[in-house]
């Protein structure tokens, strides 16, 4: 099959197609991760995007069983129930050789209706996005003797909504409450949560009440008191989620020990009067440095295209807790009362380092103090 990638600034890349024969429009972004493509492709934060892998060779360990579930009913190996990206861009593909592999990457994409393009210069594409910023694109896979013209592809782009205009969170959040585990009960506002975040809470012997993004946080559920709140990751522009922001402002919700991760970090800032902005090309990868005021630096996995303006926090009772040394963007928030903690990166890793896992330990301690444990 033939394949084409056409960007909204008129730049075009042609290559070979793999996966599904389809045409999809999305925001074209890149990740610098060297491994973990099954987790990245199923991360709900990538909903609505076409993902370029800067690592030049993909597919060598295949795809683990997408239907496998753990004891809690969560995906065993993946971050959600399905592939979330709209398209995949790689430099080279190779055949899988791994004992856990149940299918190849091309087969998985084909079964999921997701198109992919291989054989393009991903370094050139990445440099282009770093220079011009992320932009919308259309990826088309079809007969090799019928490549669409630039004008045909441009028309498809013009007919599609822009990334900030799409309501992506309703597509990836649960529709009704789900309860996991036993132990102190914490509510989780699901805007597109990764399975590994839920697993990190369960591993710390917390019970998790997973709520739809538009639900109110109850004071009690099934006869048990809610002792804490986690606001997790998800796709899209945080300023769109006005209902979540208002829920985080409610006195009973605001009184809970609270942890924000990625999009949750941004939403908590917005709920306290902060503002956010869109990054030029975002932070996506597994080798991002986060620096703390006490001089510590840790490496985290990240996947976000928006950031909080530090100067907007002055009146909201929040203070900076961590920063990114590469561009100075805000990476963490905390409240002087010790009731709120937020990290822009992903302390659960998956894929990526897990040295920021202490953030979940801190949250567990906050919940125990609230419950008198």
Image (cartoon, helix red, strand yellow):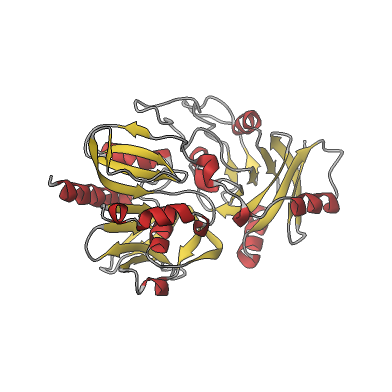
Expressed as whole percent of the image width and height from the top left, the position of residue 47 reads: 56, 45
Expressed as whole percent of the image width and height from the top left, the position of residue 86 reads: 63, 43
Q: Is 6 rendered above or below residue 308? A: above
Q: Nearer the viewer, residue 40 or 95?
A: 40
Report whether residue 104 is seen. yes
Report the residue at 82% width, 38% height from top: 144
Q: Is 64 rendered above or below residue 318? A: above
Expressed as whole percent of the image width and height from the top left, the position of residue 78 reads: 46, 35
Report the residue at 58% width, 41% height from top: 58
Which residue reaches farthest left?
372
Q: Quadrant of residue 148?
A: top right
Q: Left or right: 9 with respect to 172?
A: right
Report the residue at 28% width, 69% height from top: 293
Q: Quadrant of the C terminus?
A: top left
Report whether residue 345 is seen. no
Q: Left or right: 143 with respect to 82?
A: right
Q: Quadrant of residue 82?
A: top right
Report the residue at 77% width, 35% height from top: 1
Q: Total of numbered circles in the picture? A: 0
């Amino acid at each position: 099959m033939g394949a084409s990638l056409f960007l909204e600034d008129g730049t075009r890349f042609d290559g070979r197609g793999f996966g599904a024969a389809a045409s999809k429009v999305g925001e074209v972004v890149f990740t610098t991760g060297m491994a973990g493509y099954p987790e990245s492709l199923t991360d709900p934060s990538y909903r609505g995007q076409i993902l370029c892998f800067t690592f030049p060779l993909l597919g060598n360990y295949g795809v683990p069983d997408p239907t496998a579930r753990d004891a809690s009913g969560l995906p065993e190996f993946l971050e959600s129930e399905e592939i979330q990206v709209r398209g995949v861009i790689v430099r080279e593909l190779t055949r899988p050789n791994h004992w856990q592999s149940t299918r190849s990457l091309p087969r998985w994409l084909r079964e999921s209706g997701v198109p992919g393009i291989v054989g393009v210069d991903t370094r050139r594409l990445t440099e282009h996005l770093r220079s011009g910023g992320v932009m919308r694109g259309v990826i088309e896979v079809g007969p090799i003797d019928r490549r669409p013209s630039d004008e045909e592809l441009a028309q498809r782009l013009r007919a599609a909504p822009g990334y900030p205009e799409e309501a992506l969170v309703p597509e990836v959040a649960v529709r009704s409450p789900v309860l996991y585990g036993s132990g102190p009960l914490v509510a989780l506002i699901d805007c597109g949560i990764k399975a590994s975040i839920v697993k990190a809470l369960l591993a710390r012997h917390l019970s998790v009440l997973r709520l739809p993004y538009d639900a109110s946080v109850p004071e009690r559920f099934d006869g048990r008191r809610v002792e804490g709140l986690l606001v997790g990751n998800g796709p899209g522009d945080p300023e769109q989620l006005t209902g979540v922001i208002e829920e985080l402002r409610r006195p009973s919700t605001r009184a809970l020990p609270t942890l924000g991760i990625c999009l949750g970090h941004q939403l908590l800032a917005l709920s306290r009067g902060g503002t956010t902005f869109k990054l030029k090309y975002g932070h996506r990868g597994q080798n991002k440095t986060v620096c703390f005021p006490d001089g510590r630096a840790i490496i985290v996995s990240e996947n976000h295209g928006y950031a909080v303006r530090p100067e907007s926090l002055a009146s909201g009772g929040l203070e900076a807790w961590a920063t990114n040394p590469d561009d100075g963007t805000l990476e963490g928030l905390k409240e002087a009362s010790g009731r709120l903690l937020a990290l822009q990166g992903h302390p659960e890793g998956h894929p990526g380092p897990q040295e920021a896992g202490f953030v979940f330990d801190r949250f567990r301690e906050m919940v125990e103090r609230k419950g008198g444990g």
